[in-house]
Image: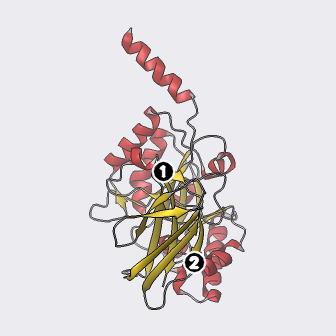
Amino acid sequence: MKKGFRYFLLYLLSLSPIFGDSQIFLLSKFDEFGDNYSISSEKLQKDFIYLKRNGYKVVSLQYLLENREKEKLVSFTVDGGYSSFYEIGLPLFREFNFPFTLFISSRAIKRKYPNFMSWKQIKRASQFGEIAVHGYSTTYLTSLEPIYVMREVQKSIRTYTKNLSVFPKYFSYPYGAYNKTVQDIVSAFYFEGIFHQSRGAISEKSEIVSLPRIPLFGEEDISSLLKTEFLEVEWIEPNEFPKDWKLRKIRAKLSPEISSIQLYVSGFTWRVFPVKNGILEAEFEEPIKLKYGHTRIFLKTFDNRWGNLDLLF
């Protein structure tokens, strides 16, 4: 009797909406051991079971973007179009009846690169999820002149529409890398959502041209990642990558009720800074010598709200 009652409670839990900000997870490769962008099928199966048992609603990107203000939702995206998704990932999504959005690298598919899906396989996968574009090649768009950024996006759309006979709804930046110039160019193509790669959540305040997806590679704990909340940030400084690679100051506008915040710069440790009247002013006595041409600055509140800024050389 007790066992039956417990299952009944679990059933009721699955019917009750969970409230809070939503998460979009990023996957790429499956069971490619030793690859930093891979997840094991065993780990992913455990994550899917966790979502089912705890009543999380896994939905398509379209549903999440249209209903993000109503309840907490979860979506999955897969970047690249690797054959390991078709062979290993897709059967798992079908087993759990979870929707997905597959972002394809058009040139790799077109030229039939090894370890990538074929157009025939992509069309079959589209019966169970959405197909979107991940750029034409795997070039960092931030390394290109504006005219070549535009051509990269145009070629990705042209190849996609030629083979799938529809216009893509969504775009994800290769490597999650973008800056203001790249964002403005990609936005001009009127995608319904443009995605990067970062720890962050989706709320009604999220910008459609800059939507974070949380990487779910290796042994990342999905139960912890699901607690991520949206942090509204207006970045003031820096507004570009420092030419001498030295970061001297970070300024940002935050909600006035925040009195202190945790700050992280790629390659360094977390630090705590005061926030006065909604303004963060983090000045470094000794400038931080940046280690990477793609540097991320994270802000995190003590109640787990996250925001980030990408700096690209």
Taking the view exactly as shown, the residue that stands out farthest to the front is 276
Q: Amino acid at mark 1?
A: Thr
| 222 or 160: nearer the viewer | 222
Foreground of the two, 36 or 29: 36
Label 2: which secondary element: loop
In which image quadrant can residue 150 be found?
bottom right
Q: Which residue appears at 61% of the width and 87% of the height? A: 148
Q: Residue furthest left?
A: 34
Give above or below for 144 relative to 215.
Answer: below
Label 1 secondary element: loop
Q: Which residue is located at x 42 percent, y 62 percent?
A: 83
- Looking at this rendering, what residue extends furthest in the top direction? 1
Question: Residue 149 appears at what percent x and percent y?
Answer: 61, 83
Q: Residues within 10 Å of mark 2 (few under 14, many from 20)?
A: some
* 1 or 2: mark nearer the eye: 1
Q: Is residue 293 left or right of residue 59?
A: left
Check disc 2 and report the residue beneath it. 179
Q: Is residue 68 visible?
A: yes
Residue 111: x, y in percent? 49, 77
Q: Position of residue 65 (x, y in %)?
A: 65, 52
Q: Which mark is residue 282?
A: none
Quickly name the residue at label 1.
Answer: 228
- Identified by mark 2, the residue type is Asn
Above or below for 40 versus 172: above
Q: Position of residue 141 (x, y in %)?
A: 54, 80
